[in-house]
Image (cartoon, helix red, strand yellow):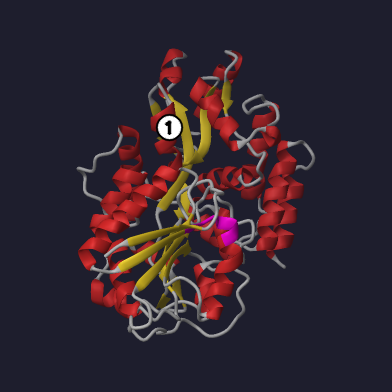
Amino acid sequence: MSVAVTRLSALGSATMHTFSLRTPAVIATAAGVLILAGCTGGGTGSDADDDTLRYLVEQPEDPAALQALEDHIAEFSEASGIDIEVEAMPFDTLRTVLQTQLQSGEGPDVFNWGSGPGFGGAFAEAGLLYDLTDAYAEYDWPFYDFAKERVTFEDTLYGIPGEMETLGLFYNADLFAEHGIAPPEDLAGLEAASKKLADAGIVPIAASNQEGWQGGHLLSMALSSRVGSTGMDALVSGEASWDSPDVVASLQLWQDYLEQGYLPEFPTSLSYDGANALFYSGDAAMVPTGSWLTFEIDDNADFEVGYIPFPAEDGPGIFAGGLGSGPMISASTTKLDSALELVDYLASPEHARWMVENLNVIPPQPIAADVDVSPLFHQVLDDTAKFSDGTGDFGYNIDVLTTDEFNEAMLDGVAAILSGQMSAEEVAAQMQAAAQQ
């Protein structure tokens, strides 16, 4: 009936999430998992050897976010009678030590980790995760079908889907109004708005790439709007080629915008935080990034902000995005009953509402309309609900679905485009070669 907190490092990561879109999948097989057996029933359900349940999450950048989670878990601990130790670890450290801990049987009982083939799927293939298929049937967790697909490996449900995140364009609505600009409804509108802003001495689109991961997001949002989810499916599955005209055009777009003065002069020298600062100061009118920024925008922007998909040639475009981290249970836990009770709570609508109202994240399940959030984040929730219930299209964040070799080729290639060192055709050919490895 208590919560102990262990901070395994003072270093923080970019977000609250164990695997966020803002944290790139630089190594799609980051876990480096050996290919063993599939998910296992694991554990005995006995809590006899130690009454304390270990729950491992990523160390957030903001200590207040971790404190809020600790307090929230403490409430569950008090109500359930389960003693819980919350451990926080930076993502890079987590990525390095988690597999070893799980293989040795000394890892956490429950931990947050990314979905997809290179993360949770790799752990499931290695037999390191408890099979939650029966638990899904028993508890009837209300997750969207597409989210459950992301935590499925060979017909086995191995985890709880993490928060949803989208990629798009935030824009300064006051600055747009001041210059007589309407929110762009297609690429022609975006380019006309960008030219008008550039002529007024304002950076139209604060694209940055100093850290290197942002380039994957720039391509993901432009390409998703160009080819839609069907086209993205074909590319990721290998049915379509990464050196196709659509990919080349989506890369060329950013090269053209750089040459036309629609981006900062040196995007590869501009940090992510530096780009956001340009937006908050009014020196830039738009910033291309993800829905996770809404919390920071609410705290820093003293103007009205809108959020739209990156436009397509023939319409408003679609949001790209995916899932962050979610809870999984170690196959070797000796506290299975307690672990399942905690995971059931973390999958509940009650916890989902708390996540929305306290951490500004989007759970992969329906959310009540009366949640207490800012107007901007309410818009993000409404937009997300459209494609989550099947009434809208949704693109992909590429680097969470592709391999280490491909991501290196893509991220290095976009950086080369933004520094004038490679052409769009050369980068697309480089990506296709990496996809075939």
> Viewed as shown, does residue 19 lie left or right of 357?
right
Q: Judging from the image, what secondary structure is the residue with disc 1 in? A: helix
Residue 419 visible at all: yes
Residue 306 vs 108, above or below: the answer is above
Q: Quadrant of the C terminus?
A: bottom right
Residue 374 vs 179, above or below: the answer is below
Residue 71 at what x, y percent from top left? 31, 52
Check if residue 217 falls in the magenta segment: no
Q: Quadrant of the N terminus?
A: bottom left
Residue in view at x 39 percent, y 64 percent: 85
Residue 125 vs 247, above or below: the answer is below
Label 1 Cα neighbours within 10 Å, binned few <14 / some 14-19 / many ≥20: some
Residue 147 picture quarter: bottom left
Residue 207 vs 89, above or below: the answer is above
Residue 341 picture quarter: bottom left
Residue 239 visible at all: no
Residue in view at x 44 percent, y 27 percent: 300
Name the outermost residue toward the right: 421
The residue where tag 1 is placed is: 297
- Magenta residues, start to end: 88-93
